[in-house]
Image: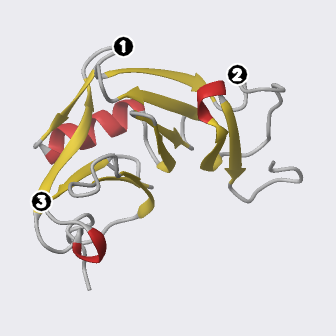
Amino acid sequence: MVTLLGGDGGNYESVAVDNTNENKPIFFTTEDNSSGELRRFEADGYGWDALHVGGRTTYLEFLDGSTFQWTTSMWAGQRSAANYYPNSEGIAYHNSTLYFVSKATRRLYILNLTDKTYTSERTGSSWVGQGSFNSHPDQIIGNDMDKRQYIYFTEDGGYAPG
């Protein structure tokens, strides 16, 4: 069964959910495409039917170097993806903050969903213990996101991808 989150399909990579309000979950998904827009789906339902009973889809649009909005224009979302976060991959939600990575730019984007501001950093450069890896970031999970403790999974590649 096709979900309302993915519509007609695409190269969707990962999904995260904000279930702060269990009766109105908000889903986010990334698309591994050079202009793959990041989608937000605000469900009308909850539980197993949340992605099948209706809701509203909007797309991430970066406005300048530090602010963003959710727009109903897929084209604006695609343009923003192409310019800022092409080939987005892993995504996580924690404490009103959305984290996602772009393998093309090798950047982690951190969106404050409350005040609609964002920052970004090179993947592997600002995390606890520093470190780096030789391939593209693929997925991200948080050990303690409040303390900036992330674990990146990398794309396969090279002699030492991660």
Task: Give the x, y percent position of residue 31.
Answer: 39, 55
Could you tell me if the residues under marks 2 and 3 are in contact, i.e. CB atoms within 8 Å? no
Horizontal side, residue 161 vs residue 150: left or right = right
User: In the rendered image, which residue does mark 3 sit on?
Assistant: 55
Residue, x 24% and y 20% (percent of image)? 63
Who is closer to the viewer here, 58 or 62?
58
Horizontal side of residue 30 vs 136, given as left or right: left
| 58 over 99 or under it: above or below | below
The label shown at residue 126 is: 2
- Disc number at residue 65? 1
Give the amino acid at mark 3.
Gly
The crowd level at tag 1 (other Cα within 10 Å; few <14, some 14-19, many 20+) is few
Q: Nearer the viewer, residue 144 or 68?
A: 144
Of marks 2 and 3, which one's residue comes earlier in the chain? 3
The spot of residue 115 in percent (x, y) is 29, 19
Query: Where residue 69 sits: x, y (%)?
Result: 21, 28
Q: Residue at x 22, y 43 (%)?
A: 59
Element class at badge 3 = strand
Colour setup of the view: secondary structure
Residue type at mark 2: give it: Ser
Which badge, 1 or 3, is on the more N-terminal residue? 3
Secondary structure under the numbered disc 1 in the rendered image: loop
Which circle, 1 or 3, is nearer the viewer?
3
